[in-house]
Image (cartoon, helix red, strand yellow):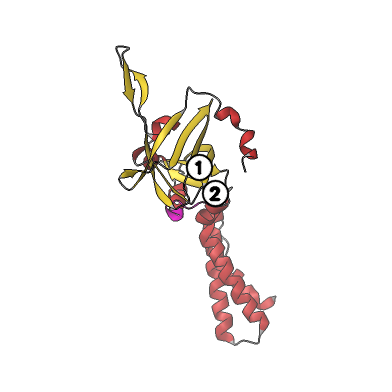
Amino acid sequence: QIFPLMRRRHLFSGSENFVFYDFFSGEQVDENVFAYSNGAGGERGLILYHNLYAVTSGWIRTSTAIAGKNDKGEAILVQKTVGEALGLNPDGRYYYAFRDYASGLEYLRSGRELCGKGLYAELGGYEYKAFLDFREIRDDDFGSWGKLCSNLSGRGVASLDEELKQVRHGAVIEGFRLAVGATAAVLAAAVGEEALEGLSDLLEDFYEELNRHTGCSGDCRSLADRKSTV
């Protein structure tokens, strides 16, 4: 499992952007979880490893204390939040997509949550997560990414782009599914006028939704009634 990460080793070879985090399970730091981030150029990576045969969950909020300097050049100990360490935008319109190279799943979190609350993770016994390929997304005028983030509730998926299609075109997809199901039932058996009228209504609803998505203005009722000629 480590071999895909070898091609990205430049992300973790330097120390300038290295940050080690506390992993809070409830109000206590789980000392069995090692969490750190690093980066090179505009790329970022975040690694978590659970060094115990058990299940744990919690948040990465802030780094452990690291050496820094104040305005006078004096040495001090400072802490960074996840948002600061990864250079994230706390604006509510921004979201961050990233992929876990251990599972292959993609995740979506809001910049506001990452910067304010941190990053939530669940880990099994001796499990690791390697979050890479961070990309910043500014939500569209319809709030599509915000809806998707809410729908996922932190869950990982195979493709965020495919899930986004469900958000943007969900009504069309559902209308098509219902119309196809009703059509299959009509074709499978002799049905009466009531069933045919119900099919016409479903087809009309589908065409109306398709009009809204495509900006067309076709006669939905006429299209729906053409079923009898097929």
Q: Which mark is residue 114?
A: none
Amino acid type at image mark 2: Leu
Quadrant housing the C terminus: bottom right
| Circle 2 residues within 10 Å: few <14, some 14–19, many ≥20 | many
The spot of residue 184 in percent (x, y) is 64, 76
Amino acid type at image mark 1: Ala
Q: Is residue 64 visible?
A: yes
The spot of residue 203 in percent (x, y) is 57, 71
Which span is picked out in magenta?
150-156
Q: Which mark is residue 97?
A: 1
The picture quadrant where one finds residue 62 is top left
The spot of residue 161 in percent (x, y) is 56, 48
The spot of residue 137 in percent (x, y) is 48, 39
Extreme-front residue of the structure: 53
Residue 171, placed above or below residue 159: below
Instruction: Please name whichever residue, 229 or 37, is drawn nearer the observer in this view of the structure.
Output: 37
- Let me know if residue 59 is in the magenta part: no
Q: Which mark is residue 160?
A: 2
Quadrant housing the N terminus: top right
Residue 44, placed above or below residue 210: above
Element marked by disc 2: helix
Q: Are marks 1 and 2 in contact (CB under 8 Å)?
A: yes
Q: Residue at x 53, y 64 (%)?
A: 208
Instruction: Please name whichever residue, 93 or 200, is drawn nearer the observer in this view of the structure.
Output: 93
Going by the image, does 22 lie left or right of 157? left
Residue 110, placed above or below residue 44: below
Instruction: Please name whichever residue, 160 or 197, is drawn nearer the observer in this view of the structure.
Output: 160
